[in-house]
Amino acid sequence: MENEKQKNVKGIKIRTLNSAAIFAACILYVLVLYATVQVALRYDELISVTDDYIECERNAALVREGSDYLTEQVRLYAVTMDTQYIESYMEEVNVTKSREKALEELGKYSFSDRSSSYLSEALSSSNKLISKELYSIKLVSLANDYDMKVLPQEVRDIQISMEDRELPEDEMLKKAQDMVFDDAYQSSKALIMNDIEHFLEGIVEETGQKQKYSAGSLDSMITQQRWYISGLFILNILTLIMLSVLVVRPLQIYIECIKEGKLMRVVGSKEFRYLALTYNEIFETNSANQALLRHKADHDPLTGIANRGTFDRLRDLLKTSKSPVALLLIDVDEFKQINDNYGHATGDMVLKKVAKLLQEQFRSNDYPARIGGDEFAVIMTDITPSLRFVIENKMDSINRVLQNPDDGLPKISLSIGVAFSEEGMKEELYKNTDKALYFVKRHGRNGCKFFEDL
């Protein structure tokens, strides 16, 4: 039977196909090499103008990046209130001066004054924003009651209006943030970008004019080169398709199916088809039971989120990670009273509600888990203490929902402890998080505390 199947198999000889492809490829490679040499000879005529264009484009990018860097630093300071961003901001303004240096470099190249004037206008517009940004920096500093003596002289020299000085701290901080995020600020930034775009358009036009004379012969050789490369590309594609169909594709499909634990696709030669059918029969016999066992092993049966075993495995996996992580430990406050007063069925519904809110609020690459009766945990990956406000907002949102139920369940609250690790799940991370949680429970519950604040 097997011999009969082999006699019926039809196909192309790989040796014949390979020899023909190599011969054709050698001819095309020689033609491509000839065209490349000709293009290189003509390309020398354009190097000078092209280099000038590249340098002008680079300097235009420096002006843009310098302006964007100042915006980034002042916005980060407005959001985080970390004075290191003031230092970075003033270093760019007074020391690095990437924008001014870029304009100096442009004077070395032979582009028209009209094109360069757009970049000068972009720098001028960027400088106009500095006074607004310094005003925002000083408002943030006043709102946080920072010592003015430690701030740069440029910030101290900014005069704050009496109206702004009389604002409450939270309104003062909001105004400072609005100054660097509102539509007026964005419009000013758009003007800078428009001037840079006009500059780039100008030098592109001038470069095109300078290159036009010598571009004719170069274009002809490039066209020939394209035809040769296209022929070589088509030849390679046809060869790869044939090899893929005959050999590579069936093997790749079966390897991926095995890795992913899926049924094999019945493709390829007779032998591959026979192998796939045999594998699929075995797979279908066991797949349902295996899926059920895996789900029970990894998930909490009540809430459907990860269980304690999965949580512990994730901790072990992340011990060697080099990425920053955060751990949240969460307790349902007075959960015993819920069970006593409303019954265990209501208590179970409360736990399901908490689990659902955790899944909705956190990212797909975060890992909520139920690690005890009324105890939950969340492992957050790729997050640093600078984003602690994100965690606070999430947990505040969850507590608001739990405190204002509209589903007939009793009002509840959560106590949350949080700690960060710069690299993976260190041994002390769980202990630090537990200490933060214990602090919340000792001081009235219904809140979120970071270990770094203890």
Image: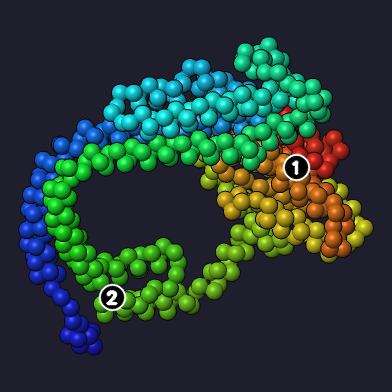
In the shown orientation, is residue 337 left or right of residue 359? Answer: right
Badge 1 element? strand
Residue 68's spot in the image, x, y percent? 51, 33
Q: Are marks 2 and 1 in contact (CB under 8 Å)?
A: no
Residue for point 66% across, 14% down: 157
Query: Which amino acid lies under the numbered mark 2 shown in the image of this protein?
Result: Gly
Question: For the residue labelled by badge 2, is the local secondary structure a helix, a strand or a loop?
Answer: loop
- Horizontal arrangement in the rendering, residue 406 relative to residue 160 (left or right): right
Q: Quadrant of residue 151?
A: top right
The answer to whether residue 292 shows anywhere in this view is yes
> The C terminus is located in which quarter?
top right
Q: Nearer the viewer, residue 172 or 3?
A: 172
Residue under the point 72% across and 55% down: 357
Q: Is residue 153 above or below residue 432?
A: above
Crowd class of label 2 (few under 14; some 14 to 19; many from 20; radius 10 Å):
some
Q: Is residue 303 left or right of residue 11?
A: right
Q: Quadrant of residue 259?
A: bottom left
In the rendered image, residue 442, in percent from the top left (x then y), is placed at: 84, 36
Which mark identifies residue 416? 1
Q: How many marks?
A: 2
> What is the number of the mark on residue 85?
none
Instruction: Name the residue type under label 1.
Output: Ile
Which residue is found at the position 81% from the left and 49% from the top? 400
Q: CA distance from mark 2 to mark 1?
A: 56 Å
Residue lying furthest right in this view?
Answer: 341
Q: Is residue 431 visible?
A: no
The spot of residue 156 in percent (x, y) is 67, 15
* Quadrant in which the N terminus appears: bottom left
Question: Residue at (68%, 56%) from the top-left corner?
Answer: 360
Which residue has dot 2 on it?
Answer: 268
